[in-house]
Amino acid sequence: MPAKLEGKVATAPPRPSRTSPVTVSDIASAVDAHLTAPDLAHVRVRGVTLRAQHVVVGDLFAALPGARVHGAEFVSQALELGAVAVLTDEAGVVHVPSGVPVLVHPRPRDVLGPVAARVYGEPSTKVALWGVTGTSGKTTTSYMIESVLRADGRSTGLIGTVETRIGERRLDSAFTTPEAPDLQALLAVMAECGTTDVAMEVSSHALRLGRVGGVGFAVAAFTNLSQDHLDFHPDMEDYFQAKASLFDGRARTEVVCVDGEWGRRLVKGGTVTVSTTGDADWTASGHRVSATGEQNFTARGPGGLSFDVTLRLPGEFNVANALLAIGCLHAGGVGVDAIREGLANVQVPGRMQRVDEGQDFTAVVDYSHKPAAVALALDAVRARSAGRIITVLGCGGDRDRAKRPLMGAEAALRSDVLVVTDDNPRGEDPAVIRAAMLAGALEVPDDLRGEVVEIGDRGRAIAHAVSLARAGDVVVVAGKGHETGQEVAGEILPFSDVDSLAEAIRGVRA
């Protein structure tokens, strides 16, 4: 049976068809690891994995300490499948039989990225990596960058929450940023396929857990920071410091949105700054929104450079995302014509995605699943609609509990009708999650709060919202965006907000 990781089936990641074997002694020297069997220093490694079920003959198996179990407990399985060496800590050594070379390091996770980079031939030196971090906007900005790079005639790749793509070949994304050996192997595959540039989301988990260790970036970009992932980070400062580690010199160029204090803290000599509200290297002016939601603005950059930009994506926050992408692309040598073309044509699944079944109201699916993102999404639709805003929103289980009442409050404040429902309850009682959201929603004063309804079943909640919609209204289904499954009690059930919304609209119009 395939293992499950964070509720998703862990399929074997792609690997390059050719690698040059590296001796365990070379690897040990590169990361300052102790090699337990010097007489086996000649053993050659062809690949790296931290999942025993994914071992390929000739692999180095990384046996890492975990929260519940030590990876060394799977050494026997890895060796049976063809692993020829093991990377682990002192606690893991006892699980490795004699005759197998062991690289011992006090923090094996910290060096796993550099180890995999060495085995796979330092692939980040063969493709240009455009890394984007921040709380909101990572996905959209990455899509914008990739769209412009394609318009510039480059062979592109994309790594992120929605998908991983090599050209037009689509792979499922298990994480926003893959584990270190999977990422290095993927970059090697991309280089082997002739990919020149890769746009990549970089999560705080990836930075803190070493998933991007051994990776060099052409450009690193920062969008913004707001409350999220406080189930993983103890506080906002720790969350920020994780994000800030992308700007520790591993990128040749750093581009930062300075509309917030967190971004301003990242600025140093040589940083390219962007702002929609103040002074920066790149600014936006003349923002206009058409009746169809298309946006236009003028981007102003260094040396008096100025050009008009068209975006099909709604919301002023997408102007900030586009300006950040422009700052990155211009710094990376991309011309104005390609920037304008790529931004005009970019589409992002599940991000302010319109669902049109010929209805007389607007229907939108958005991935917003944190307080600030919910507020931005609803403000965006309010700005271009005179009708009512009907919102469907839930919160995920086994994640940051503190944001649930905040999300409920932001949605209730901005909606004429709020339908509180389930998202991905995972291992939690869905009713408890909804109760926290409702508590926040009901703290909004009566004269500022819309009607609040609770319907646990997400499909029925969407159908109810659609049944209320009249001509000129906007139905916003928020939280899951592009996802095609709903995780309940350890099982992933097929579910798509886009499909459910479209079905509900068709049902009303029938």
Image (cartoon, grey):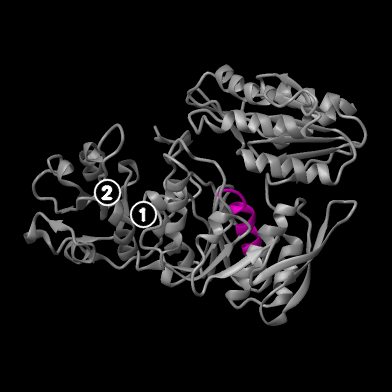
Q: Is residue 381 above or below residue 270?
A: above
Q: Which mark is residue 62?
A: 2
* Secondary structure of residue under mark 1: helix
Which badge, 1 or 2, comes first in the chain's sequence? 2
Q: Please name the residue that numbered disc 1 is placed on.
A: 181
Q: Identify the residue at horizontal 82%, vertical 42% (top origin).
A: 382
Residue 508 quadrant: top right
Badge 2, how many Cα within 10 Å: few under 14, some, many 20+? many
Badge 1, how many Cα within 10 Å: few under 14, some, many 20+? many
Considering the image in quadrants, where does the N terminus appear?
top left
Q: Identify the residue at horizontal 63%, vertical 21% (top origin).
A: 439
Q: Please, which residue is most extreme toward the bottom here?
A: 303
Task: Give the magenta-colored segment's residue range.
Answer: 135-146
CA–CA distance in space, label 1 to label 2:
9 Å
In-image side of 405 versus 233 (left or right): right
Does 136 appear in magenta?
A: yes
In-image side of 429 versus 420 (left or right): left
